[in-house]
Amino acid sequence: MAAIVPVSTLTPPCQSRAWLSAPHPDLPLVATATANALRIYSLTSFTLLSTITGGHKRSIRSCSWKPGAKDQPVIATGSFDASVGIWSQEEDDKEEWRFAIVLDGHESEVKSVSWSAGGNLLATCSRDKSVWIWEEVGEDDFETVAVLQEHEGDVKCVTWHPEEELVASASYDDEIRLWREEVDDWGCVSVLRGHESTVWAVDWEPVQGRRGDAGSRLVSCSDDGTIRVWRKKPNQERPQQSRLSIIRSSRAEEWLEEVQLPKQHVRTIYSVAWSKMSHRIASVGGDGKIVVYEERSIEGLANGGTNGTDERVTPVEPNVALGEPGAPGGNQQPARVSRENGQVKDNGSSSWRVVAECDCAHGVFEINHVAWAKAKVDGSQQEVIMTTGDDGEVKIWKVS
C-alpha cells in the first residue's frame, strides 16, 4: 500500500476552526474559509498572502473561485450570517480584496457555494433547505434565477457538473438531488436515494477521467459511513415516475447507484474529492483519517469472476435512484456492474480499492474538508491532497 506523506502545513495556521479550502483552478492559490476570515495562501511557498475580513457579520463557511478569472481573481463566500459575498482582487495591490457585492435571500446559514464551469452562474445552499441559482448579468450585478425548495432538510453541499449546467445538492434529508434548467425554468431531474443518513458532500467525476460511454458519474459521502458512486444511465428511455415524485417527466433522468467504495471510516465522512490528475478519490471525516481509493480495470466481472488475485468479485445490485422512496442501499462489493431486466451487465469492468490511508492526520481533531490540487513540491508541480481541520490547520500531503 502507498503512503500518505506530509509535505507542508500552510503558515501561519488559523487560530480557530477551518471549514474548507478551495484551490484556484489555474493559479497557485488556495482560499480557506475560517471562523473569522477568508485566508489566501500560496501553493508555491505555502505561506499566507492575504487575510480578508469584513463583509460578513459571522463565520465564513464556504468559498469557491470563479472559473476563468485569472487576471483579476474573483471568489464567492458563504457565511453563517445567511449571506453570500463576491470578492475581487484589487488590480494595484494583489494583497487587497474588494467586497464587490452581497447576495441576500437565504433565511439561515449558507453551507456551500459553487460556480458553474462557465463562470456565469452561482449555486448556493443553506440550512433553510433551499438551493439558489444566481446569474451574473453585469459587473457586480447578479439576479436570482431560481429558488429550489424540494429538499426536506438542511442542504449541506452544492456543486456544478464540470461541463454541463447541472447542479448536484446533498442534504440532511439523506438525498441527493440533481437540477437543470429547461425552457427558462429550473427543476429537479433526479433524486438519488440510498444513503441512510445525512449526505455531507458530493463531487463530480472529472471529464478527463471518464471511461468510454458509461455516462457522467458522481461520488457522495454520508453520516452512514459509506461512499457511493452514482452513474447516469446512458441512452435511456424516460423512466416511470412514482406518484410521490414531483419530477417533470419531460426532464427526468435515471441515475443508478453503481458501487459503494470499501468501508474504511468509523465515523461520519464529511468530504470527498475526485482527482482530475490521478482520477483517485480521497475522503476525510470525523475519525481524523484520510483514505485514498483507486479504480482498477478487471476482466470477467459480468460473470462474477475474480480480479486476478483470487479475490472473488460479486456483481452490484444497483439502487435505481429515481422515484423510489425507501430503496435499498445496495451492495458494498466494489464491482462496476449492474443488473437490468434480470441480466448482469458490465458497465466498465473496474473495481475500487484502498491504495493509501493515514490515521490521526490532524491529531485528535476532525477533518472537515479534502481537496486535490497542484503544488510545487521538491522543485516540480505535483498532485497533492489538501486537508482542512478543526485545529485550524490546512495540511498538504502527497501519495507515494
Image (cartoon, helix red, strand yellow):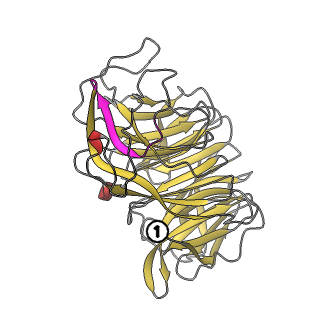
Viewer-nearest residue: 247 or 297: 297
Q: Is residue 263 above or below residue 47?
A: above
Q: Is residue 334 magenta?
A: yes
Horizontal and vertical percent position of residue 40: 60, 70
In the rendered view, does 89 fall on the left or right side of 118? right
In the rendered view, does 357 fall on the left or right side of 288? left
Query: Which residue sits at x=26%, y=51%?
Result: 299
User: Which SS class for mark 1?
Assistant: loop
Horizontal and vertical percent position of residue 246: 44, 18
Query: Which residue sits at x=42%, y=64%?
Result: 69
Viewer-nearest residue: 87 or 124: 124
Query: Which residue sits at x=22%, y=50%?
Result: 212
Task: Write down the residue under mark 1.
Answer: 72
Q: Amino acid at mark 1?
A: Gln
Viewer-nearest residue: 374 or 219: 219
Horizontal and vertical percent position of residue 202: 50, 46
